[in-house]
Image: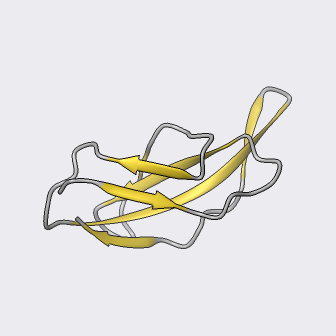
Amino acid sequence: KGKVNLSWTNLTGEDGYTVYYSTSKNGTYKKLTGTKANVVKFTSSLSSGKTYYFKVRSYTTVNGKKVYSDFTKVVKCKV
């Protein structure tokens, strides 16, 4: 209850991933802390019975700045 485990295909050459979530598919997405793994356990402030939407993008660091990939498809998850 109140938890979501997300995983995705690991890429080669990335420095990490950033996960975003929203309470509506086309709504405003909140950014979670970046992760080096291709799995994240999201347990912060999720309400049981509510639907959430997630998307992920990878990043590499070039000249000290993060360069992001395109987003994954949005995934819907009911907690």
- Indicate the quadrant where residue 15 lies: top right
Q: Position of residue 69 (x, y in %)?
A: 71, 56
In front of the other: 77 or 31: 77
Q: Residue at x 86, y 29 (%)?
A: 63
> Does residue 3 lie above or below 25 as drawn?
above
16 to 46, vertically: above or below: above
- Percent of width and height locating residue 72: 59, 67
In the shown orientation, is residue 6 left or right of residue 71? left
Q: Position of residue 62 (x, y in %)?
A: 84, 35
Q: Is residue 31 left or right of residue 34?
A: left
Q: Which quarter of the rendering shows the C terminus? A: bottom left
**Viewed as shown, does residue 10 lie left or right of 13?**
left
Residue at x 20%, y 54% (from the top left corner): 2
Instruction: Tally the marks.
Output: 0
Residue in view at x 65 percent, y 64 percent: 9
| Along the line of sight, the residue nearer the viewer: 61 or 24 | 61
Residue sitting farthest toward the right? 63
Name the quadrant containing residue 5: bottom left
Of 20 and 46, which appears nearest the observer?
46
- Seen at 48% across and 71% down, the residue is 74
| Quarter of image, res 44 | top left
Vertical arrangement, residue 60 with respect to residue 24, above or below = above
